[in-house]
Image: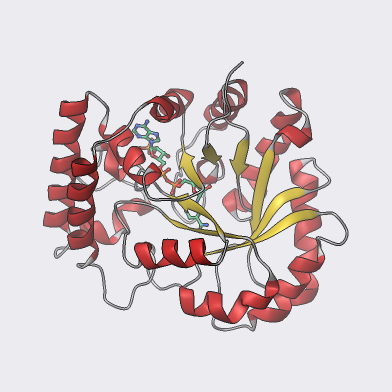
Amino acid sequence: MMTQSKLALGTWQFGPDHGFWTDQALEDSKATLRFALKDTIRHIDTASSYGMGRSEQIIGSIWSSYHKREDLQIDTKFMPKAPHLVEKDVLTSLSRLKTSYVDTLYLHWPSSRISLLPILEQAAAQKESDRIKKLGLCNVSISLLEQLKPLLFSTLQVPCSLLWTRNLKPLVQYAQENQIQLAGYSPLGLGLLSGAYRTKPSDERANLYVYSEQAYPHFCRLLDALKTVSQEKKYSMAQVALLWARSQGFDTILVGARRAEQLAQSLATDHMALDSRHIKELDELSETLCSHAPKEWDNLFGHRW
Ligand SMILES: NC(=O)c1ccc[n+]([C@@H]2O[C@H](COP(=O)([O-])OP(=O)(O)OC[C@H]3O[C@@H](n4cnc5c(N)ncnc54)[C@H](OP(=O)(O)O)[C@@H]3O)[C@@H](O)[C@H]2O)c1
């Protein structure tokens, strides 16, 4: 019997939005998900905003052909709006996903413009009607986590990527001390760590800080190191980047894929490992790269709230 992978499939790619993944073909998304569910993936991450619901719809059209609901973990996210809209958003997600509950409902991004507590209370209340099993937060700093502690959220989703290690270690320590489960995203740096984008991609990824004048030489040094390790270990650069992410003490790593072959390569890391000297070298190069992101940023995508 095949053992379930500890990787989760991220499905932002299935619902192109905000200029990311704009050329993704529907058939490729469906084939990737079918492959994942036939293979060892049992955990799927999506969001209501991915393609304005398209990602959720694709998942909803496929999962039940492969597994019983209780054998899958399906997580989704909602954007902060007025508290009375939370229930409506959850019901819309459930309808698209063709399920009566989601395993973890995440707040997708915090916002400094609206009060989060009443919104999160509404989200937590969805547990009482069995529409969600757990509440999670994404992209929240330690100081905000401290304020939100009484809400009994159980999972935190943040970048776990060589493109963004600023404050990573304190966050991992905080999560361990407070029994918060950690899910890490963008382990392949949205594909940039595969080495295919030494020159800027043609989509919104071109605006990531690593292509800025200050950061770019350090991004190239990181790519060079990934290449050297990949030659030594006979893994691909993407696999090396993913193995680094898998070594960071997270409970789950969410990996994105646009095609089944990409996901097959990522799943192969279930049976691979890096040496500690490789991890240390990549840690140091990543720290230097991140030090060239704008000082006020607290996330790979900037300071967005
Ligand atoms: N909570 C949040 O705010 C948040 C933010 C970001 C992501 N996420 C979640 O985390 C998931 C994963 O993160 P991510 O999508 O940002 O990026 P990622 O997993 O770092 O990168 C995925 C991209 O890498 C490329 N790729 C995949 N497998 C590859 C392989 N084996 N070899 C070479 N290239 C490969 C593909 O892009 P190309 O084919 O274009 O190169 C793919 O779209 C998302 O899907 C989403 O579910 C959450």
Q: Can the viewer see residue 34 in this picture? A: yes
> Vertically, is 32 above or below 253?
above
Q: Residue lying furthest right in this view?
A: 129
Position in image of residue 171 (x %, y %): 43, 66
The residue sitting at 69% across, 41% down in the picture is: 57
Left or right: 199 in relation to 302: left
**Res 209 → quadrant:** bottom left
- Quarter of the picture containing the N terminus is top right
Q: Is residue 263 left or right of residue 83?
A: left
Quadrant of ligand 1: it is: top left
Would you place residue 195 above or below residue 235 in this image? below
Residue at the front extreme, as displayed: 177
- What residue is rendered at 47% in x and 68% in y? 174
Q: Quadrant of residue 39?
A: top right
- What colouring method underlies this structural image? secondary structure
Which residue is rendered at x = 54% and y = 39% of the image? 8
How far from the left and from the top, in percent, is residue 190?
Answer: 38, 46
Q: Which residue occupies the foreground of this view, 183 or 202?
A: 183
Residue at 50% in and 42% down: 13
Q: Position of residue 20 (x, y in %)?
A: 44, 50
Position of 287 with respect to 31 (left or right) is left
Task: Answer left or right for 66 relative to 276.
Answer: right
Q: Is residue 305 visible?
A: no
**Image position, residue 94 (x, y; %):** 78, 49
Q: Reply above or below: 112 against 2.
A: below
